[in-house]
């Protein structure tokens, strides 16, 4: 299985997001997964599709079994680096975002019956979620 992560922090590998992704991918590697980490700030992702690095990033995205998009939260949103990358994924219609019962669920391809059932589950409070995680 291949795990590919994209770090949207402008600080790259020195960022908290980069460090967290390193730990995430180390765990995946210990479980036998192949891993890749891309710091989006190291790549040119511009408006011109003829002269940027998106082709390499898209190949990595498409070849992954698991994709992790990571970003620090600036002004209640992802960084511009990650937003630009996500916007450039739109031609693939992937991840497919489906809104149901107030949730957003990301899936590669169609949303099957099982996740649809999970989407109908009631929302948990932050305290309930922490308890659910066993923390």
Image: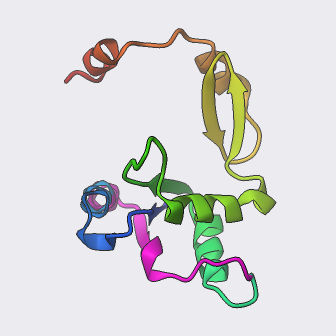
Q: Which residue sits at x=57%, y=63%?
A: 64
Range drawn in magenta: 25-48
Classify 80 as above or below 122: below
- Is 134 magenta? The answer is no
**Residue 105 vertical position relative to residue 127 in the rendered view, above or below:** below
Front position in the image: 46 or 107: 46
Residue 48 placement (x, y as % from top left): 73, 82
Residue 56 percent location from the top left of the image: 61, 81
| The residue positioned farthest toward the left in the image shown | 135
Viewer-side residue, 54 vs 45: 45
- In x, y percent, where is residue 85? 60, 65
Q: Is residue 117 left or right of residue 129?
A: right
Front residue of 7/61: it is: 7
How many numbered marks does the figure carry? 0
Query: Residue at (44%, 81%) from the top-left corner?
Result: 42
Residue plotted at (32% across, 12% down): 128
Residue 86 quadrant: bottom right
Observer-nearest of 131 and 2: 131
């Amino acid at each position: 299985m291949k795990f590919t992560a994209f770090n949207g922090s402008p600080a790259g590998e020195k960022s908290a997001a980069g460090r967290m992704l390193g730990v995430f991918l180390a765990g995946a590697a210990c479980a036998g997964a192949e891993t890749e980490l891309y710091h989006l700030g190291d790549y040119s992702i511009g408006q011109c599709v003829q002269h940027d690095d998106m082709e390499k990033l898209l190949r990595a995205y498409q070849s992954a079994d698991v994709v992790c998009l990571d970003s620090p939260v600036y002004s209640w949103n992802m960084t511009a680096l990650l937003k630009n990358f996500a916007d450039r994924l739109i031609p693939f219609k992937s991840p497919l975002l489906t809104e149901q019962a107030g949730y957003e669920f990301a899936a590669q391809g169609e949303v099957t019956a099982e996740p649809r059932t999970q989407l109908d589950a009631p929302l948990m409070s932050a305290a309930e979620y922490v308890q659910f995680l066993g923390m």
